Image (cartoon, coloured by chain):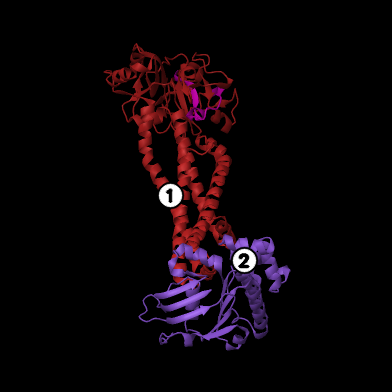
């Protein structure tokens, strides 16, 4: 067997030009499969790490996935707001420990602005129940003195090069329409959060009262004509919010979660809904899963195409090698040796390609990881291959073995038919 | 050493036998010249002798064993052990160097390797001494086989057929690609080495002038009682 393998190696080395091209294409499809799987796993992990320690997310009635997407991931928007009075009723439920209101809608240079209460910085947890930490400064106080204070997520500060004390002007809505800036009421950066690897990094946090203040002289999404309330005077108005977008709810004990959920869903004051973050994420994966399967299927097809290339290349060379097969038969190689020789050649190419693909995917993730994190907020892990990645790799190798058997069997039949008298 | 009895052979899908030989015996250590024009079934006969083909009827025995009594895998192993084979040309794997091509002769048989070790200390040592004796200069030994001239390749092929001293050497027109001067040198080397190793040699050629060098010469058309096939 070792003799055969070393012959296969020598024979393959002889055609290294063509075979290395085939190995390269196998490497590329391995790279595609592994990187896709890595991104898929890490995106899921990032999503599930985005919120923890929150028992329920409460919002207006909509899809539970949609509620999670806008309340936690700042993707999409709310169809309806909920009344603060309703939240107070929820907070009064005896099983509820805390309620943190969230108000979304404005932005700053593409980054979402979140209006909330100082409790957010104490209650919010991500990853393995890790609390938010301030890298610099402090949270906004919630008092009128520091009304226009903003706390920046790590990435907002990094990308826009903001430091404590810098001035920030918010835009109304997504900020794409001209003249939609809250230029009359600029904010001051009072705190910068440490990186979390979650959507928090991409968010600017201000107090609910400040959010009210900048919208005092706005109606229906535009500044009211002839009305301009200067920043200082705004403090004299009633800045208590009447409505918010959603709220995070923490319970005294997990056991009451379904009771509170039912309480919220059956709330009589207005139509509300409460979702369990874990359940909503599972629903999200069900939706996303279809697309993932499609992409995985396409990557698998690419791998099949490169293996077909391997089969075609080895088969194409086979006719010219009939004399070699006859020589091998003459020195005592059986047809089964010929089969092993050809299959081993294909297997060596597949192995080389797969190994190259693994290295390339490691290099890609090491090289592109920081860029992906800063542009898409997804932290890619440079860890040992996951079980599913191992399965994919095993799949490529197994398909390679099967594919290599095709030229092997052809050579087997050829050498049986030709014996010592090759027709070529 | 070699014994054919009542041999009948037809190719699959052929309606007539192409070989019908009642009897042929080659004694151990004998050198036999088989003469015949091209297309008379010489290569078929040699494939039968080497156990790559099996007769439709009758027996072909080598070193006391009938090929038909062995399984396909055993036939391959038996051939590796007892037979050295020489083609007309293209005897070598072009991508192996000269020494490795010679060693190919004992790669599929431990007993051939053991015999080579017994005679020269190691298979590589015997490969070197054989290459020296067939007159291939040592500067070429580590070149790939494809870089050699046809004459040089045939010498390497002879060394490969002779390594590990097989009982039988079968040669299928090994000189037809060589010019007269090279041919005479090659014949002297091949016959000399077979005699030195005590190997039985069956040598097939259309060139009758070579017959005088052998212990015995037969004509295949004279031996073959099958009707000549039209159009072959």
Q: Is residue A210 left or right of residue A194?
A: left
Could you say which is closer to the camera, residue B157 or residue A309? B157
Nearer the observer, B154 or B159: B159
Res A228 seen here: no
Left or right: B143 in relation to A369 = right
Colour in which chain A is shown? red
Q: Residues within 10 Å of mark 2 (few under 14, many from 20)?
A: many
State left or right for residue A161 relative to residue A221. right
Q: Position of residue A257 (x, y in %)?
A: 34, 19
Q: Which residue is mark 2?
A: B164
> Dot 1 lies on which element?
helix
Q: Chain of mark 1?
A: A
| Quadrant where the N terminus of chain A is found in the figure | bottom right
Label 2 vs label 1: CA separation? 50 Å
Question: Pointer 1: what residue?
Answer: A300
Neighbor class of circle 1 (other Cα within 10 Å; few <14, some 14-19, many 20+) is: some
Chain part drawn in magenta: A187-208
Q: Measuring from the top left, give residue A154's x and y in whole percent.
A: 55, 28
Chain B takes which shade in the image? purple
Image location of residue B177, percent across then percent down: 60, 81
Q: Mark number for residue A72?
A: none
Residue occupying the point 55% across, 38% down: A369
Q: How many marks?
A: 2
| Quarter occupied by residue A256 | top left
């Amino acid at each position: 067997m070792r003799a055969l393998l070393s012959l296969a190696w020598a024979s393959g080395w002889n055609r290294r030009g063509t075979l290395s091209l085939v190995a390269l294409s196998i490497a590329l499809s391995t790279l595609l499969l592994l990187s896709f799987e890595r991104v898929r796993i890490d995106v899921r992990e990032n999503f599930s790490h985005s919120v923890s320690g929150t028992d329920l997310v409460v919002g207006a009635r909509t899809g539970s996935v949609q509620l999670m997407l806008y309340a936690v991931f700042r993707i999409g928007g709310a169809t309806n707001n909920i009344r603060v009075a309703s939240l107070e009723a929820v907070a009064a439920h005896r099983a509820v420990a805390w309620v943190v209101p969230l108000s979304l809608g404005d932005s700053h240079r593409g980054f979402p602005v979140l209006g909330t209460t100082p409790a957010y910085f104490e209650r919010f947890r991500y990853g393995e129940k890790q609390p938010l930490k301030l890298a610099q400064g402090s949270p906004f106080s919630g008092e009128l003195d520091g009304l226009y204070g903003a706390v920046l997520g790590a990435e907002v500060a990094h990308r826009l090069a903001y430091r404590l004390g810098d001035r920030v002007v918010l835009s109304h809505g997504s900020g794409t329409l001209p003249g939609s800036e809250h230029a009359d009421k600029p904010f001051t950066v009072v705190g910068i959060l440490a990186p979390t690897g979650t959507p928090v990094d991409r968010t600017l946090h201000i107090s609910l009262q400040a959010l009210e203040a900048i919208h005092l002289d706005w109606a229906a999404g535009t500044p009211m004509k002839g009305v301009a309330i200067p920043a200082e005077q705004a403090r004299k108005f009633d800045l208590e919010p009447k409505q918010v977008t959603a709220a995070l709810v923490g319970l005294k004990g997990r056991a009451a979660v379904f009771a509170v959920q039912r309480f919220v869903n059956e709330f009589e004051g207005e139509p509300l809904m409460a979702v369990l973050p874990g359940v909503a994420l599972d629903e999200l994966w069900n939706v996303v899963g279809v697309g993932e399967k499609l992409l995985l299927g396409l990557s698998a097809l690419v791998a099949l195409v490169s293996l077909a290339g391997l089969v075609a290349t080895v088969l194409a060379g086979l006719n010219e090698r009939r004399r070699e097969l006859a020589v091998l038969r003459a020195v005592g190689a059986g047809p089964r040796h010929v089969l092993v020789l050809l299959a081993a050649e294909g297997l060596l190419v597949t192995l080389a390609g797969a190994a190259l693909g693994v290295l390339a995917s490691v290099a890609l993730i090491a090289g592109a990881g920081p860029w992906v994190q800063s542009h898409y907020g997804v932290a890619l892990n440079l860890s040992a291959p996951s079980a599913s990645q191992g399965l994919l790799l095993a799949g490529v190798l197994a398909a390679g073995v099967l594919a290599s058997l095709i030229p092997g069997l052809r050579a087997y039949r050829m050498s049986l038919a030709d014996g010592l008298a090759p027709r070529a | 050493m070699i014994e054919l009895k009542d041999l009948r052979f037809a190719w699959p899908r052929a309606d007539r036998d192409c070989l019908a030989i009642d009897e042929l015996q080659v004694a151990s250590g004998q050198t036999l010249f088989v003469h015949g024009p091209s297309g008379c079934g010489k290569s078929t006969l040699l494939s039968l002798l080497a156990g790559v083909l099996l007769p439709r009827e009758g027996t072909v025995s080598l070193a006391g064993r009938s090929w038909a009594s062995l399984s396909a895998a055993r036939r391959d192993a038996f051939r590796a052990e007892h037979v050295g084979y020489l083609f007309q040309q293209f005897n070598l794997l072009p991508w192996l160097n000269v020494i490795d091509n010679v060693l190919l002769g004992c790669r599929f048989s431990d007993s051939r390797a053991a015999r080579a070790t017994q005679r020269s200390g190691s298979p590589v040592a015997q490969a070197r001494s054989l290459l020296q004796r067939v007159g291939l200069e040592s500067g070429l030994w580590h070149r790939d086989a494809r870089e050699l001239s046809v004459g040089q390749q045939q010498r390497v092929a002879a060394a490969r057929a002779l390594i590990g001293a097989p009982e039988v050497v079968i040669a299928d027109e090994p000189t037809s690609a060589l010019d007269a001067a090279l041919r005479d040198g090659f014949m002297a080397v091949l016959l000399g080495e077979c005699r030195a190793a005590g190997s039985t040699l069956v040598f097939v050629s259309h060139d009758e002038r070579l017959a005088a060098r052998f212990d015995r010469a037969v004509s295949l058309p004279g031996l073959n009682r099958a009707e000549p096939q039209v159009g072959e």
